[in-house]
Amino acid sequence: MTEERSHISLFNEARYQRCNLQPRQRLFRYDHCAGGRLVGTLSGVVEDHQLVCGHSAPFGGIDWVRRREPVGAVVELIAAAARRARAEGIGAIVIRARPAYFGANEAALEFALHKLGAVVQSCELSLGIAAGRYRTPADYVAALKSPARNRLNHGLRAGLLCSAAEGTAEWAACYDILADTKRRRGTWLKFSLDYLLGLRQIFGPCIAMHKLVRDGEIAAASLVYRIAPGWDYLAAWGDRVEHRGNEVMNVMAYHLVCEAIAGQVGVIDLGISSVDGVADDGLIQFKRSIGGMTGLRIDFRLSLDRADAGIGAA
Amino acid sequence: MNLPAAARRPNPQAAAHITLFNDERFQRCNLAAGQRPFRYDHIVGGRLIGTFSGVIDGAVLDCGHSAPFGGIDFTRRGESAGAIADLLRVAALRAREAGASELRVRARPGYYGPNETAVEFAMLNLGAAVDACELSLGIETARFGSPQAYEAGLKSSGRRTLRHGLHAGMEFAAAESAAEWAACYALLDETRRRHGARLRISFDYVMQLREMFGQRIAMHRLRREGELAGAALVYRIARDWDYVVAWGDDLRHRPYRVVNVLAHQLVRQAIAQRLSVVDAGVSSIAGVADDGLIHFKRSVGATTGLRLYFRLPLG
């Protein structure tokens, strides 16, 4: 069934989840149909009687066929999925939800989870660019505040060329820049180059590496997953310190937005800007300056053992 | 540092960022015996970041008391998330010093701007629980440079419905006299009754607010062929935020899409006055969504948000 496959986002894909599956873990999928229509799907991985939606991914979320589902249908999907999970012996569902800038269904999901008695396990700040609001790159530039516009214009004059990384050598060079950027921030890339190339082999151009080249040298790179037809997720980005004077990250953001507009992508998720509930205000300020909207990435936990779980009987 | 009482009082400029529902005058209209207002101004490096206001009732400090919501009032619209977390942390300490053992925050939906999201982030990471959650929809009028841009942003069915209504040639104006206000109030009350509910505020209360806050409390009306066809009670809760307390129509004029036209006129006015949000209110009751109402509000361009009620024990 093409329809059933097409609405599943990358992080909920069985092929993606299988890349990270450990022994004693199994896949779970519940397709919710109402009135003969597929409404959406809750997918995840089960381990030790716990179902995790968004397992080994930045987030999961429910995959909807329509972008603005009636809220009643959202509540029913969660309740029905929970009943199915409980019937399979699952005691709790953890949903790593998408931020609200992904659309109206995300707010409805949060509403449904609160209504059904879910608790918030963790909450991080996340920013994303609503690229769908811009008809042209000029619209995007016009919407920036003047300091960011000035920085972008400065960067655009530096003669940086944006293109996709092609061969393994280019991917490796870009990967090194991303890993180095993370190290400078006291952290590390959570996946290896081999893992990345494995994803690329499975998902093709949905796993993309963009590079900015100046004077024949890669100045910056960004790893972008096309997680759904209208959604891009920026898995990592970074620059070489020696090119920082040319505002390469502002230029990179601009090119990602141009690409999104051309590809009719509505959202570019720029990822989280807090760690363990502590905000990184510098990063937030930068992301806001390039047009990022503030959202939350919330992990909800819905216990199915509680007698008062509001999901009804199986 | 001990300051004289006058120096500790917030200066008049500092009050400009206080929203209507957090305004002490608004809260005093609803204060019962034993309740008292609370206010904490968070100042860092000589700069006022924002204010936590509420009402202390017994051991509970309630932000958004006797109002649809409260929320924290910030002087800037894109405050740093760290400063917001600090404000809430210190406000919680002050609340405890004032005798409260529990903090309740009826927060504003996310479409009011990034500060609201940062408040949710801070509250959840301070350990607050979500006590209740309602769906709320609002039109982000700042996104539209002109009424034409707003219309272009509607889906084709919403645009067609609006054009049909606009052809009816209804006249949009503010209610002026007490008689006009009373007629509009009666229409709003009747609309609520049709939905099996009732207006929670009396006519006298609305007029009292009007007297206190002047044009920030506004009644708009639509007239068709000399008859009142629709009305909307709108509070200007902040410099650039409107809150639709109630709106309704006369069934005889419903074929002319009165509420669609009303929404359009409110948005036109908001764009002209450079407002950023027209809050169309909640569309769920006690956690049960009203999908018909949500569908209507989405059709007039509203964004879906949540009105979250947080509860934070103060230890």
Image (cartoon, rainbow, N blue to C red):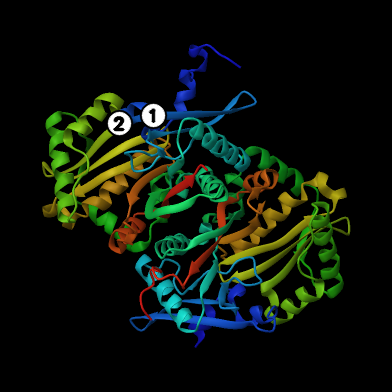
Q: Position of residue A228 (x, y in %)?
A: 57, 71
**Residue A257 picture quarter:** bottom right
Give the class, few, some or many, for how many residues have Cα within 10 Å of label 2's Cα (few <14, many ≥20): some
Find residue B31 and name its label: 2
- Residue A260 vertical position relative to residue B263 in the rendered view, above or below: below
Q: Position of residue B23 (x, y in %)?
A: 38, 29
| For residue B80, side relative to residue B56 (left or right) | right
- Residue B221 vertical position relative to residue A263 in the rendered view, above or below: above
Q: Amino acid at mark 1?
A: Pro
| For residue B249, side relative to residue A95 (left or right) | left
Q: Secondary structure at mark 2?
A: loop
**Residue B79 picture quarter:** top right
- Find out whether the residues at labels 1 and 2 contact each other: C-beta distance under 8 Å: yes
Q: Quadrant of the N terminus of chain B?
A: top right
- Residue A242 vertical position relative to residue A261 in the rendered view, above or below: above
Is the residue at mark 1 from the same chain as the one at mark 2?
Answer: yes
Q: Position of residue A150 (x, y in %)?
A: 70, 40
- Give the chain letter at badge 1: B
**Residue farthest to the bottom?**
A1
**Residue A80 picture quarter:** bottom left
Find residue A46 and name its label: none
The residue located at (61%, 74%) in the rendering is: A10
CA gap, disc 1 and disc 2: 8 Å
Residue located beneath label 1 in the image: B37
